[in-house]
């Protein structure tokens, strides 16, 4: 396993296992964050997906953590470790077609004082009209709050394997 994968795995494990700090010492550690945090994370993810739909490279790039912290996994393998790799893949993948991804059943838990693990099922539509096609699966994100902004520290996407029978 490469050092970046090992570091990313360790970061995820530390974030998931670390005690959760909260704004209020009176709030039990297991109690949900105030609704504003969930709405903020949901809005960030929606903004990120709409930026990918528009091909807004500046907004997409700003959505990711620094390269030394970022890792994206697809179908069990590390695929991207920088925003530039993500942008290149999005450009090659879409081939100029419209791309729209919708999340369904978005849920999230705290993963540290300023971190969230969010997950959902997704459906991506490529193209428009009768030639459009769809695919979907599961997607997860690990987000951290850097100053006033959420950024994607890492994530995972997987799709059902084709039926080989």
Image (spheres, rainbow, N blue to C red):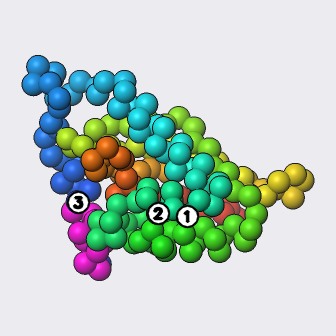
Residue 108 vertical placement versus 32 (above, below): below
Residue 11's disc number: 3
Q: Residue furthest top?
A: 26
Across and down, in percent, residue 63 comes to 44, 56
Q: Quick one: quadrant of the N terminus? A: bottom left
* Of callouts 1 and 3, the N-terminal one: 3
Residue depicted at x 63% and y 71%: 91
Across and down, in percent, residue 73 comes to 44, 65
User: Where are the magenta residues, as a range?
Assistant: 2-10
- Secondary structure of the residue carrying tag 2 is helix
| 164 part of magenta stretch | no
Q: Quick one: quadrant of the C terminus? A: bottom right
Across and down, in percent, residue 74 comes to 49, 65
- Secondary structure of the residue carrying tag 1 is helix
Determine which quarter of the picture holds residue 119. top left
Q: Kindly identify which residue carries mark 1.
A: 57
Determine which quarter of the picture holds residue 30. top left
Whether residue 36 appears in this view of the structure is yes
Q: Kindly identify which residue carries mark 2.
A: 61
Horizontal side of 28 relative to 160 (left or right) equals left
Residue depicted at x 49% and y 45%: 45
Whether residue 77 appears in this view of the structure is no
Classified by dominant secondary structure, the portion drawn in magenta counts as helix
Horizontal side of 122 relative to 21 (left or right) equals right
- Kindly report which numbered mark, 2 or 3, lies closer to the viewer in this rendering: 2
* Of callouts 2 and 3, the N-terminal one: 3
Q: Residue furthest right?
A: 130
Q: Residue furthest bottom?
A: 2
Question: 97 or 142: nearer the eye?
Answer: 97
Question: 122 or 44: nearer the eye?
Answer: 44
**Disc 1 from disc 2: Cα separation:** 6 Å
Are the residues flagged by discs 1 and 2 in contact, CB closer than 8 Å? yes
């Amino acid at each position: 396993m490469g050092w970046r994968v090992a570091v990313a795995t360790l970061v995820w494990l530390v974030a998931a296992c670390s005690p959760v700090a909260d704004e209020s010492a009176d709030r039990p550690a297991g109690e949900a964050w105030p609704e504003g945090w969930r709405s903020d994370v949901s809005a960030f993810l929606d903004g990120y997906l709409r930026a990918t739909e528009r091909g807004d490279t500046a907004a997409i790039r700003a959505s990711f953590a620094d390269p030394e912290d970022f890792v994206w996994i697809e179908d069990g393998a590390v695929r991207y470790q920088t925003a530039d790799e993500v942008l290149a893949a999005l450009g090659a993948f879409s081939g100029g077609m419209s791309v729209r991804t919708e999340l369904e059943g978005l849920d999230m838990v705290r993963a540290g004082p300023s971190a969230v693990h969010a997950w959902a099922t997704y459906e991506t539509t490529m193209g428009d009209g009768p030639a459009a096609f769809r695919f979907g699966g599961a997607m997860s994100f690990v987000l951290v709050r850097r100053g006033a902004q959420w950024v994607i520290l890492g994530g995972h996407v997987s799709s059902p394997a084709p039926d080989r029978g």
